[in-house]
């Protein structure tokens, strides 16, 4: 079935599957596999950067560099047509300086939400992210006291 013949319901199911597969590749630290789910002209909307998949790659690579043992669990995922929204729990070890706070080696958990728009080929073309920065700061500050 071509992308043109695909119903909105089928597209939503495919996009949700691709979203979860991208998260799985990220957790395996396989950025090449993860990037296969992003269009080359991908646009991050929650950061002021130009179009290009290299920006999301750099962002995701920096997350692994900053947070030791980072894992993302998609706890709720909703898909409708070209849109996929996830509420995820991220868990990591505070093993590098973050927000000006020296490493505490404590396990940190924080919720984040991401919204992705997919193209007709099932690739992510736009991304918005919201992270609970206050929860992160409270946990790393408490660990540094």
Image (cartoon, grey):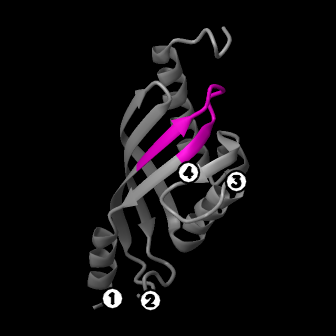
**Quadrant in the picture for residue 99:** bottom left
Query: In the figure, is residue 115 to the left or right of 33?
Result: left
Q: Give the structural element (helix, strand or loop) at label 3.
A: loop
Disc on the earlier residue, 2 or 3: 3
- For residue 84, the mark is none
**Quadrant in the picture for residue 66:** bottom right
Quadrant housing the N terminus: top right
Quadrant housing the C terminus: bottom left
Disc on the earlier residue, 1 or 4: 4
Q: Give the structural element (helix, strand or loop) at label 4.
A: helix
Cα separation, mark 2 vs mark 3, equals 33 Å
Pointer 2 with pointer 3, Cβ within 8 A: no
Cα separation, mark 2 vs mark 1, equals 7 Å
Cα separation, mark 1 vs mark 4, equals 27 Å
Query: In the figure, is residue 8 to the left or right of 122?
Result: left
Cα separation, mark 1 vs mark 3, equals 37 Å
* Residue 73 x/y as whole percent: 42, 47
Q: Nearer the viewer, residue 103 or 55?
A: 55
In the picture of the structure, the residue carrying the numbered disc 3 is 52
Q: Give the structural element (helix, strand or loop) at label 2.
A: loop
Range of magenta residues: 114-126
Pointer 2 with pointer 1, Cβ within 8 A: yes
| Image point (46%, 52%), residue name | 128
In the picture of the structure, the residue carrying the numbered disc 2 is 102
């Amino acid at each position: 079935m071509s992308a043109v013949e695909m119903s909105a319901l089928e597209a939503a199911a495919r996009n949700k599957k691709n979203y979860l597969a991208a998260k799985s590749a990220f957790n395996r630290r396989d950025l090449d596999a993860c990037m296969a789910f992003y269009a080359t002209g991908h646009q991050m909307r929650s950061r002021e950067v130009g179009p290009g998949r290299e920006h999301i790659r750099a962002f995701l690579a920096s997350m692994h560099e900053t947070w030791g043992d980072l894992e993302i669990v998609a706890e709720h995922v909703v898909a409708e047509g070209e849109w996929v929204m996830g509420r995820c729990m991220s868990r990591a070890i505070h093993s590098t300086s973050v927000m000006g706070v020296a490493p505490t080696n404590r396990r940190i958990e924080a919720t984040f939400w991401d919204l992705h728009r997919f193209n007709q080929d099932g690739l992510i073309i736009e991304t918005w992210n919201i992270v609970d920065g206050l929860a992160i700061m409270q946990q790393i500050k408490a660990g540094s006291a």
